Image (tube, rainbow, N blue to C red):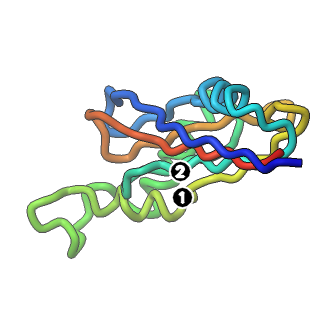
Amino acid sequence: MLMKSKTEYLEFNTKNKIEFVRITEKVQQVVSASGVKEGLVLVNPMHITAAVIVNDDEEGLKKDFVDVLERLVPYKANYRHNVGEDNAAAHIWRQLMGHQVVMAITNGKLDLGPWERIFYCEFDGQRRKRVLVKVIGE
C-alpha cells in the first residue's frame, strides 16, 4: 500500500475572546479529500492561546470548562507575562485543556465515539485563526 498525506489549514474568525468552535465536520472534509481510508489525523491550533479538544457538544459543559479554568487560573490575576499584554491566563488554559489531538481514521471516517466532537478552543480571540489538519495513512 502507498502511504498518503494531506495538509490543510482551516481558517476562521473568532467573535469572542473565549470561544469553542466545533470543527468536526471540517476535519472530516479534509479526511475525505485525502483519500486515506486507514490512518491518523493531527489537528493542531496554530496559536499559543488556543487548544483543540474532543468532547461532548453541550453548552453547559463548555461553560463548566470556562468556569473551572477561571477558578484555577483567573484571567485577570497579576501574571509576570502580562507586561503589555493581558493573556497569560490564556497561555496556561491552553496547557490545561491540551494542545492538539490525534484521531483515528477507519474506513475513511473519523473514528469518533457516539458523543465525541472536535473543538477549537479559543482563549484570547476576536481575530483571524488557523488550525492545521494533517492526515497520514493508506
Q: Where 26 falls versus 130 (above or below)?
A: above
- Mark 2, residue position: 44
Which residue is found at the position 60% from the left and 26% from the top?
A: 26
* In front: label 2 or label 1: 2
Q: Where residue 1 sits in the image (x, y, percent)?
A: 89, 48
Which residue is found at the position 26% from the left and 56% from the top?
A: 87
Which residue is found at the position 69% from the left and 33% from the top?
A: 34
Q: Quadrant of the C terminus?
A: top right
Q: Is residue 132 left or right of residue 12?
A: right
Q: Are marks 2 and 1 in contact (CB under 8 Å)?
A: yes
- Mark 1, residue position: 99
Quarter of the rendering containing residue 126:
top left
Which label was assigned to residue 18?
Answer: none
Q: CA distance from mark 2 to mark 1?
A: 7 Å
Which residue type carries mark 2?
A: Asn
Q: Nearer the viewer, residue 55 or 73?
A: 55
Q: Is residue 130 left or right of residue 35?
A: left
Q: Residues within 10 Å of mark 2 (few under 14, many from 20)?
A: many
Q: Where residue 37 sits in the image (x, y, percent)?
A: 85, 36
Q: Where 104 falls versus 30 (above or below)?
A: below
